Image (tube, rainbow, N blue to C red):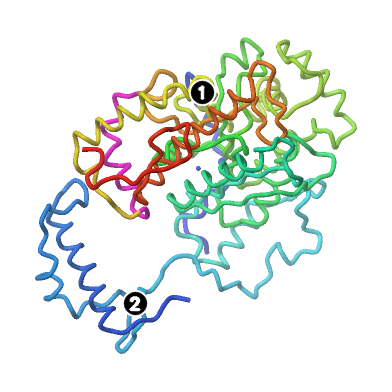
Amino acid sequence: MVSSEASHFCSNHSTMAKFSSRNKSSSCFSDACLFLGGALSALLLVWGFGSFIAPFPSSNPNFESVATKLKSFKFPGSVAGDTNCAPATHGPDLQDDSPEKTFYDDPDMGYTMEKPMKDWDEKRKEWLSRHPSFIPGAQERILIVTGSQPSPCRNPIGDHLLLRLFKNKVDYSRIHGYDIFYNAALLHPRMKSYWAKYPVVKAAMMAHPEAEWIWWVDSDALFTDMDFKLPLNRYKDHNLIVHGWPRLIHEKKSWTGLNAGVFLIRNCQWSLDFMEAWTSMGPQTPEYKKWGKILRATFKDKEFPESDDQTGLAYLIAEEKEKWADKIYLEGEYYFEGYWEEIVKTYENITERYSELEREDERLRRRHAEKVSESYGAVREPYLMEAGKGRGSWRRPFITHFTGCQPCSGDYNHRYTADLCWGKMVKALNFADNQVMRNYGYVHPDLLDNSVSSIPFDYPA
């Protein structure tokens, strides 16, 4: 029996989508274990009395006296005589796979776009019922998926930029406890360029039945607010979330009414069916040229004749509204992904505003382990309420997307120059990296310079 925590799967409510305006333990001697246990207990006790708002200790805790009294402390789950310093671990059991058969044992099951999956919600439920350690937290479990072409970049610095862009996604995933999959293979020989991601997304769904959401993030997009997390509760009745504006799609019939380079899609049957309809416009089908003409006739501002995924998605929302639109959430309240040219110029002002907050509240200056970074984001959040979100806000933009720059091929939009694209990309990467490296004691003083400097205690008081 699967608990209610894992029973959501496809959203099947009839509520219309909300369209708003604009994710070998080491062994050691027992004495050392006792010392570490005592020190940890001291921290826990002092934190408990230090503040009712956030776990921040008083400025001069007496670690020695508390540690002396708690020398007998043992980690939860430890047994007498155990000299392993590590506490017992809890969570998904990664070493247990039920011997009972699942959909994986069906020889007709396939990962490719050519093999449709049916009854996926029931098959996911069955898999979870046979792997119950994955049930807790299942409704919010996210797999981030990204990737790049299988061959080296033509742009001389392209591979370096892609490496840094991937590091950025790994940093964000690590901080928030998300799994991440990077694909560097072309899974369908005819689905290239922007169509290449859909075979990857489908395969990721099949490979990760424990994940409720698959979060595709283009290789040229990066996280620039390491604290922010997706408001998943807002999307509880929807299966696909993209950055977009209903008026541009329905009234203006503009292909730029949304951006398909970053999207969150629920791991469910609705999504598989939707992707089948979506990719039916792709280059692997005999209808590809026909769809190019249809899309260009529907969206007059479309600049090129080929059928593309972004315009295809806009078409399904606008022209097949009754079938799909009520499960698609067009997110416009924050930078679910934001255009880099309007964002990068705001980084210095944003950095200064955040520094002002930290000078005002010493809790935000406190050094801490990276693993507890989310708690400090929660402390900062009330200060950011007045900042707003999206354009004109001094809040860090969630995702900065370098559309039109093409860092790997180097075939950037004619409106830009190479120096502009690569220079702004380095600036964005260092802006994001400062939020990570600070927990390691360093920052980039100059966002256009990759070098770092160590930071003093109580920075930036």
The residue labelled by disc 1 is: 19
**Magenta stretch mostly in which secondary structure?**
helix
Front-most of 19 and 399? 399
Task: Please tell me in which quadrant of the rendered image residue 147 appears.
Answer: top right
Left or right side of 440 for 268: right
Residue at the (45%, 41%) spot, across then down: 451
In which quadrant will I find the C terminus?
top left
Determine whether the residue tagged by mark 2 lies in a helix, strand or loop. Answer: loop
Q: Residue furthest bottom?
A: 81
Mark 2 and mark 1 lie on one chain; the one further toward the N terminus is 1
Say above or below: 415 vs 424. Answer: above
Task: Please tell me in which quadrant of the rendered image residue 48 appears.
Answer: bottom left
The amino acid on which the numbered mark 1 sits, given as a three-letter code, is: Phe
Left or right side of 134 for 290: right
Q: Magenta residues?
A: 370-387
Front-most of 434 and 194? 434
Local crowd at mark 1 within 10 Å, few (<14), some, or many (≥20)?
some
The residue labelled by disc 2 is: 85
Image position, residue 199 (x, y; %): 74, 45
Local crowd at mark 2 within 10 Å, few (<14), some, or many (≥20)?
many
The amino acid on which the numbered mark 2 sits, given as a three-letter code, is: Cys
Left or right side of 4 for 374: left
Residue at the (75%, 49%) spot, across then down: 185
Front-most of 304 and 32? 32
Image position, residue 303 (x, y; %): 74, 15
